[in-house]
Image: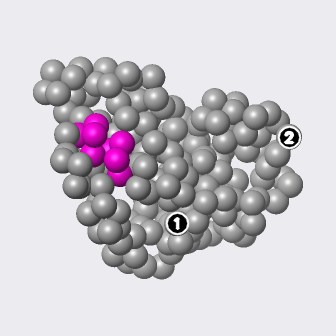
């Protein structure tokens, strides 16, 4: 099973009882802002996002990015959304990998995943060779660090105020000087 599954007690307990191997893949939250904003702005009819017209009425890409961080009447704040999932990081039997790790060292991650879910040692090379992100409608470019090209000084300040502590906790920054 794959998907966006919040980390709440009943789900955690059920995965433990059923011995379901859980892998939590997370991303630099600044890149999440960029990705979410482009998803909202996409005119591809296959990409469903609640209340796209609300966001399209905003004056700019930057304003939409700010709303993705702060939230709006139709979208909870990034902090609230992230914290629904963050509990997986503290669940010992869960394999936690960052998207950056997966993109930069896919073989090491494939080995970890195969070991976690009990696949044979021949599986990781097959897993890596079958990676085909362009087959996914939600895959845009998949680059790491796109936020650096997108964030204005104002967006950096808004993000630091709302989410900066999470960047440090996740290991994406060492302090507030980015």
Magenta region: which residues?
110-117
**Are there few (<14), some (14-19), or many (20+) residues within 10 Å of tag 2?**
few
Q: Secondary structure at mark 1?
A: loop
Where does the image place residue 106, in percent across and percent down from the top left? 44, 57
113 vs 157, left or right, is left
Residue 177 - label: 2
Q: Nearer the viewer, residue 99 or 73?
A: 99
Task: Give the residue furthest to the front.
Answer: 121
| Nearest to N terminus: mark 1 or mark 2 | 1
| Residue 152 within the magenta-colored segment of the rendering | no
- Residue shown at 66%/59% (left/top)? 145
Name which residue lies at 85% across and 40% down.
177
Label number found at residue 41? none
How many badges with numbers are in the image?
2
Q: Which residue is mark 1?
A: 142
Counting from the top left corner in percent of width and height, residue 82 is at 52, 38
69 horizontally vs 46: left or right: right
The answer, for residue 161, to whether it is visible in the render is no
Q: Does any portion of residue 6 appear in the rendered image?
A: yes
When the figure is inspected, residue 37 is found, relative to residue 18, above or below; the finding is: below
Q: Residues within 10 Å of mark 1 (few under 14, many from 20)?
A: some
Q: Can you give x and y, in whole percent of width and height, for residue 44 in the image?
A: 42, 79
Asked whether 35 or 148 is in front, the reply is 148
Residue 15 position by quadrant: top left
Which residue sits at x=82%, y=36%?
176
Q: Is residue 112 magenta?
A: yes
Question: For the residues marked 1 and 2, what is the alpha-carbon distance in whole angstroms?
Answer: 25 Å
Tell me the colour scheme of the image.
one colour
Q: Secondary structure at mark 2?
A: loop
In the rendered structure, the answer to whether residue 78 lies left or right of residue 163 reads left
Q: Which residue is pictured at 23% across the width and 55% down the height?
A: 123
Q: Main secondary structure of the magenta part?
A: helix
């Amino acid at each position: 099973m794959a998907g966006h599954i919040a980390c709440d007690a009943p789900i955690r307990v059920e995965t433990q009882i059923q011995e379901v191997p859980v892998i939590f893949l997370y991303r630099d939250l600044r890149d999440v802002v960029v990705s979410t904003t482009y998803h909202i702005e996409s005119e591809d009819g296959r990409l469903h996002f609640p209340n796209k017209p609300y966001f399209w009425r905003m004056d700019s890409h930057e304003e939409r990015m700010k709303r993705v961080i702060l939230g709006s009447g139709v979208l909870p704040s990034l902090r609230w959304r992230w914290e629904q999932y963050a509990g997986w990081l503290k669940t010992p039997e869960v394999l936690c990998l960052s998207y950056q790790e997966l993109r930069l060292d896919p073989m090491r991650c494939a080995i970890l995943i195969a070991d976690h879910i009990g696949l044979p040692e021949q599986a990781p090379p097959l897993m890596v060779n079958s990676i085909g992100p362009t087959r996914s409608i939600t895959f845009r470019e998949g680059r790491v660090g796109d936020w650096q090209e997108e964030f204005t000084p104002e967006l950096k300040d808004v993000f630091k105020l709302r989410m900066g502590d999470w960047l440090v906790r996740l290991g994406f920054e060492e302090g507030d000087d980015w």
